[in-house]
């Protein structure tokens, strides 16, 4: 697909080549459907893997599900794909209730964490497999598999078997295979976790590009917050089988509504403060408190490292413990006089003035932050 059609798709939510004669874009398959998960529950013995998970995903939207190991991400995707049954809850795709529809009639593509290609089939046959199941003729199968391999940059590897492909190439074939049947919904369960950092970021960008081109509604599971924030339209944070917060990456980062989200998405400090009428005083600075904050009087305030300022000062309120060079930005860890440890982001140019042992003054920016009742 050319970048022109891709841009057209971005502009009006529909591929340029769909615009004539096919007004019911839904039917082309290659446009995403709305997905609604309503109060999903699934227990395995005493373990509540899903504990009232609800989530709406818009047509063509890319939502990343983020959460710690064991929080229910894979269980949610498997339930959505029809690979597992629910105790209760409802799954809707468009207007259709598919809660009790079999996996093979759900019109979803799924890519799993481990490469799951058929070892005895070439890349092309792997991609064409789902089309064969759908009784698409061999000429057409070959053509569509070729197009998909082209899309993931592997046309020259069509005749290779999985063992002749690198890990990243195998994941691309798995992605092409999931897309070949033109699913309305694409489910990706940590598809990049086995890959090295560079291939991982390339393939992540490629998944996003293809997803925008194709317009498939996509749920992408990861436990890597950078990955989630980097690619998704919205990120949902799951905790113990429920959705804790969902929103665009910047909203989740700048306005976490719970301590769990503040600490799971990005780095954060816990600083002592005193709260009164929507403001907390932290290290002498009045910090406006975000919606979701609780407590008055003694509170714990969640402050991002980039909101912490550190300057050398012989009469300061802390001492540098460690300094870490990280490229253009670096971090220093400071022990305050009250024994709290604070992580601050500093420019690498400042690092030379902040070696471990330096007496420093630590203050915070008046950026909105979340607070909770202090537990002492
Ligand atoms: N088939 C099963 N039998 C018993 N317990 C299960 C089964 N599948 C999942 N669980 C449990 O349900 C919980 C959620 O598991 P799930 O695989 O959804 O987690 P996850 O969020 O995908 O974790 P990870 O990031 O480690 O992949 C875990 O406590 C897990 O042990
Ligand atoms: Mg999992």
Image (cartoon, grey):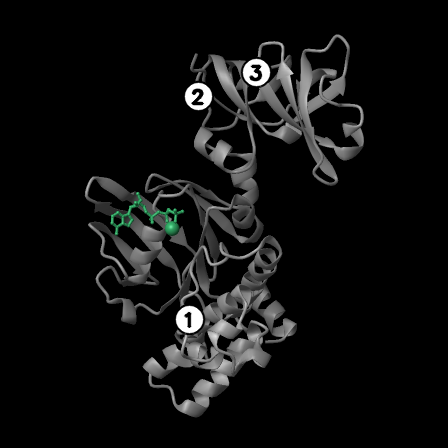
Label drawn at residue 43: none
Q: How far apart are the two marked residues, 2 and 1, measured between alpha carbons?
A: 50 Å
Give whichever of discs 2 and 3 has the lower sequence position.
2
Q: Residue furthest top?
A: 315
Q: Which residue is mark 1?
A: 117
For label 3, the crowd category at 10 Å Cα-Cα, with few meaning under 14, some 14 to 19 and many 20 or more, is: few
Q: How far apart are the two marked residues, 2 and 3, measured between alpha carbons?
A: 21 Å
Q: Nearer the viewer, residue 190 or 8?
A: 190
Distance from mark 3 CB to nearest ligand 1 atom below 8 Å: no
Disc 2 is placed on an element classified as: loop
Q: Nearer the viewer, residue 59 or 262?
A: 262
Question: Where residue 157 appears, x then y in whole percent?
Answer: 56, 78
Q: Which quarter shows the C terminus? A: top left
Question: Where residue 58 appears, x then y in whole percent?
Answer: 43, 57
- For discs 1 and 3, the disc positioned in front in the rendered view: 1
Disc 3 is placed on an element classified as: loop
Q: Is residue 156 above or below residue 58?
A: below
Label drawn at residue 340: 3
Q: Which residue is mark 2?
A: 294
- Give me the residue at 50% from left, 19% from top: 300
């Amino acid at each position: 697909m050319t970048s022109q059609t891709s841009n057209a798709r971005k502009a009006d939510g529909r591929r340029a080549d769909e615009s004539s004669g096919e007004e019911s874009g839904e039917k082309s398959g290659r446009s995403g459907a709305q997905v609604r998960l309503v109060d999903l529950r699934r227990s395995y013995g005493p373990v509540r893997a899903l504990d009232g998970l609800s989530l709406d995903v818009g047509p063509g939207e890319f939502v990343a599900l983020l959460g710690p190991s064991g929080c229910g991400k894979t269980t949610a995707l498997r339930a959505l794909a029809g690979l597992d049954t629910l105790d209760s809850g409802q799954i809707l795709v468009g207007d259709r209730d598919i809660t009790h529809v079999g996996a093979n009639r759900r019109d979803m593509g799924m890519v799993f964490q481990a490469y799951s290609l058929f070892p005895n089939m070439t890349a092309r046959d792997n991609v064409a497999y789902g089309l064969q199941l759908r009784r698409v003729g061999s000429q057409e199968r070959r053509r569509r598999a070729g197009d998909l391999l082209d899309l993931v940059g592997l046309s020259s590897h069509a005749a290779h078997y999985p063992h002749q492909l690198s890990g990243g190439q195998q994941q691309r074939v798995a992605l092409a295979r999931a897309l070949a049947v033109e699913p309305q919904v694409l489910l990706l369960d940590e598809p990049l976790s086995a890959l090295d950092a560079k291939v991982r970021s390339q393939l992540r960008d490629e998944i996003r590009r293809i997803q925008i081109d194709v317009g498939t509604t996509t749920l992408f599971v990861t436990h890597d917050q950078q990955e989630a924030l980097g690619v998704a339209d919205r990120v949902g944070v799951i905790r113990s089988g429920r959705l804790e917060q969902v929103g665009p990456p910047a909203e989740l980062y700048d306005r976490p509504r719970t301590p769990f989200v503040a600490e799971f998405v990005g780095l954060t400090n816990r600083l002592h403060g005193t709260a009164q009428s929507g403001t907390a005083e932290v290290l002498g600075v009045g910090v406006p408190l975000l919606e979701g904050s609780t407590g008055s009087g003694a509170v714990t305030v969640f402050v991002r490292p980039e909101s912490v300022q550190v300057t050398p000062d012989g009469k300061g309120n802390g001492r540098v413990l460690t300094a870490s060079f990280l490229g253009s930005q670096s971090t220093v860890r400071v022990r305050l006089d009250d024994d709290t440890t604070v992580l601050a982001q500093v420019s690498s140019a400042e690092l030379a003035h902040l070696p471990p042992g330096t007496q420093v003054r630590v203050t915070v920016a008046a950026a909105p932050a979340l607070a909770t009742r202090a537990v002492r």
